[in-house]
Image (cartoon, rainbow, N blue to C red):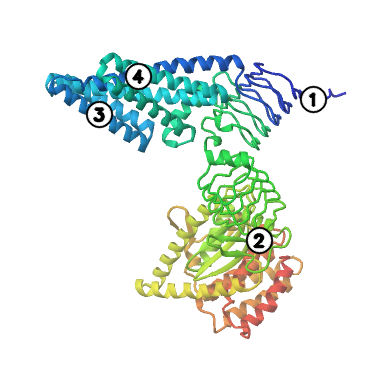
């Protein structure tokens, strides 16, 4: 008997403070409402684990240790601030003129430092400080100024460094204190301020009695500056992100650790995640795919590294589940759990939603322009009124059970689909699933059918393991034609599209060169060829406007037919595209003789319905050859297709020839599409082609 599947461990409501789960497989484990403060889940497998309502963070002993460290840092900050105040006052005490100039330089540097900090943040001011200090040392070393002035410049650099370090340390102290805990943070902040102020004032008094007040003022200014830095860091100001990062990293020391853990589909609903470390390890990244953060508490005070949680807007969305009318332009939401979120009217332009799950999400009137949604699950999502311009989807995008009345394919509510009315149930999914399984071949100046037929067949032969067929031909207006090709969802559509375009462009150039050689007058031939192309454009427009679905299939077996075809001289274009030179310059009379010979061979073939089929093909041949409205080139093209039909009749079991015959029927229809319905050829084809197709089993 098979062993029973072990049940996931249940730690619900338990006291797990300081427990070590490092590297363990805890898939599906229940930690709901457990006390996991200080627990170590580094590199653990926690897929589908439940931490709903759990309490993470620091144990009391670590909180006490952090408070001691905060106090030590406060003392250091106080001494640095006192040193700054001491130098500022010292240079303005009665003395020589050079000392006074040094004091002015110090004040100017203070002002510049404060300005850069306020406008550009702490990182920029620290960079300016380091540069200024290096410059001061260089000037003093070079002796560019008088000795006293050089000393003053060097002192100015030293003062600047002192102020900068004092601000950075004090800011980190304040942030760390605030993140350490509500009560402890308040105490730490108060103590830090008091110590800083006291030490700064004492340092000033030590300089001179007359400068005591000024020294105390300098110390007070340093305290205010440090408080401003910490306040902006707590508010999430990007200018002081470095201070906030230091504070968060400090507060997470000794806290609950999920470093490098696999948190796929893990549930943190309502969990308190203050002082929790989600950063990666040297061995692996922490996996947040589809983790649920709904109503998680103090996630902004957790160490999240460079994950999607580092973006405050994304973090707020994952916690609150409310992104109504908000902007997430270029946001990284890859792998996010957005089930049921409100993204009504949200701007998700250029966002990365790859592998995210948006089941039942409200995306009505949302802007999904150029959004990446490969591997995204939209099951049951609401998409009415959404803009889907150029959104990036593939066969891995789940569009099942979508609730959608209409969408727009262009921004500013343009190109509504459906154009009027609403989607019926399941129509939206069907529409976009068809798009996923097709390749759109776009022709902006009409279609050269010779080049197209060759290029498409070559594409099929070169990709014999991929089933390809023409689904439809559409007229988009302004000379733009679209041939939609069926392809398996897993096919590399970009590669197939590129291969066809390269072959088609080479074929068109080769055919154009052929026409030039035949007519022997370059300028005139180009004009004639362009006119013929324009005529063909009109033909394809009429054909595309007819309610007909074109299906063309070809496989690698057509290689055999190509090899058994006329072995006359070939010429090569670009090393890859071969055109039969004898056939390309054959006259209308010559092709008529070839068709007659092939039909005669069909009549003598011992095949079912061969004689009847030959009779119909002879009638079709005669109708094409004698029609006065068809141009010679069009007659030649149509007769070549009749020849293909006759060859297919000789080998009815050959699937490749049958598929090529199907293509031939469509090409003949396209050739005569420009003729009026009352024309004799059009009337004959309307009767002959269905009968021929039936005998060929098309």
Under circle 2, the secondary element is helix
Q: Give the spatial CA distance, label 4 vs label 3.
A: 17 Å
Disc number lying in front (3 or 1)? 3
| Side (left or right) of 248 relative to 222 | right
Tell me the quarter of the picture where residue 37 sits: top right
Are the two marked residues, 2 and 1, in contact with CB atoms closer than 8 angstroms?
Answer: no
Q: Residue at x 48, y 15 (%)?
A: 69
Could you tell me residue 108's position as x and y percent?
24, 31
Please indicate, yes or no, whether residue 590 appears anywhere in the rendered image: yes
Q: Give the spatial CA distance, label 4 vs label 1.
A: 62 Å
Under circle 3, the secondary element is helix
Could you tell me residue 225's position as x and y percent?
38, 29
Nearest to N terminus: mark 4 or mark 1 = 1
Please indicate, yes or no, whether residue 570 appears anywhere in the rendered image: no
Residue placed under numbered mark 1 in the picture: 7
Under circle 4, the secondary element is helix
Residue placed under numbered mark 3 in the picture: 107
Under circle 1, the secondary element is loop
Q: Residue at x 57, y 79 (%)?
A: 625
Residue placed under numbered mark 2 in the picture: 659
Could you tell me residue 74's position as x and y percent?
43, 18
10 Å crowding of disc 1: few (<14), some (14-19), many (20+)? few
Disc number lying in front (2 or 3)? 3
| Side (left or right) of 296 relative to 74 | right
Nearest to N terminus: mark 2 or mark 1 = 1
Which disc, if any, is residue 200?
4
Nearest to N terminus: mark 2 or mark 4 = 4
Q: Is residue 570 above or below residue 197?
A: below
Could you tell me residue 624's position as x and y percent?
59, 78
Disc number lying in front (2 or 4)? 4
Nearest to N terminus: mark 2 or mark 3 = 3
Disc number lying in front (4 or 3)? 4
């Amino acid at each position: 008997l098979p062993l029973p599947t072990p049940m996931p461990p249940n730690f619900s409501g338990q006291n797990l403070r300081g427990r070590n789960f490092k590297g363990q497989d805890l898939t599906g484990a229940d930690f709901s409402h457990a006390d996991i403060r200080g627990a170590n889940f580094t590199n653990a497998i926690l897929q589908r684990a439940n931490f709903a309502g759990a309490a993470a963070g620091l144990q009391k002993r670590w909180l006490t240790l952090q408070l001691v460290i905060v106090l030590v840092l406060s003392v250091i900050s106080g001494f640095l601030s006192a040193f700054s105040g001491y130098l500022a006052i010292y240079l303005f005490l009665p003395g020589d003129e050079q000392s006074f100039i040094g004091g002015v330089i110090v004040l100017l540097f203070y002002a510049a430092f404060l300005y850069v900090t306020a406008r550009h943040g702490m990182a920029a001011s620290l960079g300016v400080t380091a540069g200024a200090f290096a410059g001061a040392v260089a000037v003093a070393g070079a002796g560019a100024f008088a000795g006293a002035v050089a000393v003053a410049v060097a002192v100015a650099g030293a003062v600047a460094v002192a102020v900068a370090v004092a601000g950075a340390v004090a800011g980190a102290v304040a942030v760390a204190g605030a993140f350490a805990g509500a009560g402890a943070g308040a105490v730490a902040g108060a103590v830090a301020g008091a110590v800083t102020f006291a030490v700064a004032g004492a340092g000033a008094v030590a300089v001179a009695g007359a400068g005591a007040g000024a020294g105390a003022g300098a110390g007070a200014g340093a305290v205010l500056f440090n408080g401003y830095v910490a306040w902006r860091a707590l508010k999430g100001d990007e200018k002081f992100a470095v201070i906030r990062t230091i504070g968060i990293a400090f507060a997470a020391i000794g806290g609950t650790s999920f470093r490098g853990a696999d948190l796929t589909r893990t549930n943190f609903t309502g969990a308190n995640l203050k002082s929790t470390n989600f950063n990666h390890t040297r061995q692996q990244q922490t996996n947040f795919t589809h983790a649920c953060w709904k109503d998680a508490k103090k996630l902004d005070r957790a160490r999240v590294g460079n994950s999607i949680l580092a973006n405050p807007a994304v973090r707020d969305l994952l916690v609150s589940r409310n992104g109504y009318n908000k902007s997430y332009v270029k946001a990284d939401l890859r792998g996010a759990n957005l089930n049921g979120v409100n993204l009504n009217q949200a701007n998700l332009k250029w966002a990365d939603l790859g592998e995210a799950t948006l089941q039942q999400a409200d995306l009505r009137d949302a802007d999904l322009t150029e959004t990446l949604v490969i591997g995204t699950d939209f099951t049951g999502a609401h998409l009415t009124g959404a803009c889907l311009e150029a959104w990036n989807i593939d066969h891995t995008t789940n569009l099942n059970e979508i609730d959608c009345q209409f969408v727009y394919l262009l921004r500013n509510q343009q190109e509504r689909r459906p154009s009027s009315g609403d989607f019926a149930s399941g129509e939206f999914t069907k529409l976009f699933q068809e798009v996923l399984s097709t390749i759109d071949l776009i022709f902006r100046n009409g279609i050269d059918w010779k080049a197209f037929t060759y290029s498409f067949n070559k594409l099929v032969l070169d990709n014999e393991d991929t089933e390809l067929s023409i689904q439809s031909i559409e007229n988009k207006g302004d000379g733009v034609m679209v041939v939609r090709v069926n392809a398996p969802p897993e096919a590399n559509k970009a590669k197939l599209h590129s291969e066809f375009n390269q072959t088609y462009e080479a074929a068109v150039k080769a055919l154009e060169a052929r026409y030039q050689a035949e007519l022997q007058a370059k300028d005139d031939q180009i004009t004639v060829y362009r006119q013929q192309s324009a005529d063909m454009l009109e033909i394809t427009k009429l054909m595309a406007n007819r309610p007909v679905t074109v299906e063309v299939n070809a496989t690698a077996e057509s290689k055999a037919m190509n090899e058994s075809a006329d072995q006359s001289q070939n010429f090569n274009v670009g090393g890859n595209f071969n055109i039969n030179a004898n056939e390309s310059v054959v006259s209308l009379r010559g092709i008529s003789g070839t068709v007659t010979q092939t039909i005669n061979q069909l009549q003598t073939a011992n095949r079912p319905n061969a004689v009847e089929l030959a009779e119909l093909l002879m009638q079709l041949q005669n109708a094409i050859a004698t029609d006065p409205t068809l141009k010679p080139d069009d007659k030649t093209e149509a007769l070549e297709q009749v020849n293909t039909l006759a060859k297919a009749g000789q080998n009815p079991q050959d699937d490749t020839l049958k598929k090529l015959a199907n293509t031939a029927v469509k090409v003949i229809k396209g050739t005569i599409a420009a003729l009026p319905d009352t024309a004799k050829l059009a009337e004959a084809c309307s009767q002959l082609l269905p009968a021929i197709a039936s005998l060929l089993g098309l």
